[in-house]
Image (tube, rainbow, N blue to C red):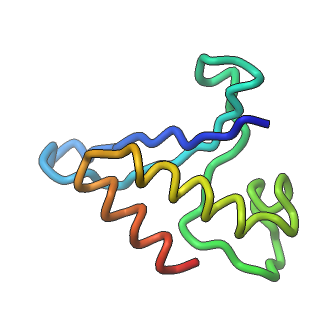
Amino acid sequence: MNLKLRITKHYSSDSYIKPKHIRMSIVDLDKSPDYPVNFVCNLPKTIKVNERQPSNFSKTFGDNKLEVARTLLNDALKTEDDPDIISDIEARLKIL
């Protein structure tokens, strides 16, 4: 699996200055170069070790979920230049 984060900013209708939220989707570039065909799952804001109702991310990556999340976030941090996205990535890395 050749995994990468696809990061999109979503704005509210009343403010186009600051994004309402930033969505991080995990894509597998081995499946296809085009989104949404290569979609795997979304990266949750918080990743818990023991979940009552595991997220799709936890179901997909199991015990390796923290390693996968750190790797994807660090790779995205190296290539990203948008300040809003960089601050969101750094915040997610601190939580992990």
Quadrant of res 13? top left
* Of 12 and 96, the residue lying toward us: 96
Please state if 6 lies on the left or on the right of 48 as rendered: left
> Could you tell me how many numbered marks the image carries?
0
* Residue 86 image point, x, y percent: 33, 57
* Residue at 71% in and 78% down: 48
Counting from the top left corner in percent of width and height, residue 6 is at 51, 38
Image location (x, y in percent) of residue 34? 60, 17
Q: Residue at x 59, y 53 (%)?
A: 72
Left or right: residue 66 compared with residue 8: right
**Snapshot quadrant of residue 89:** bottom left
Residue depicted at x 48% and y 70%: 92
Which residue is situated farthest in the front direction here?
78
Q: Residue at x 79, y 37 (%)?
A: 1
Q: In the displayed structure, does residue 93 sit left or right of residue 52?
A: left
Q: Is residue 68 above or below residue 26?
A: below
**Quadrant in the picture for the C terminus:** bottom right
Q: Position of residue 33 (x, y in %)?
A: 62, 18
- 23 sits to left or right of 60: left
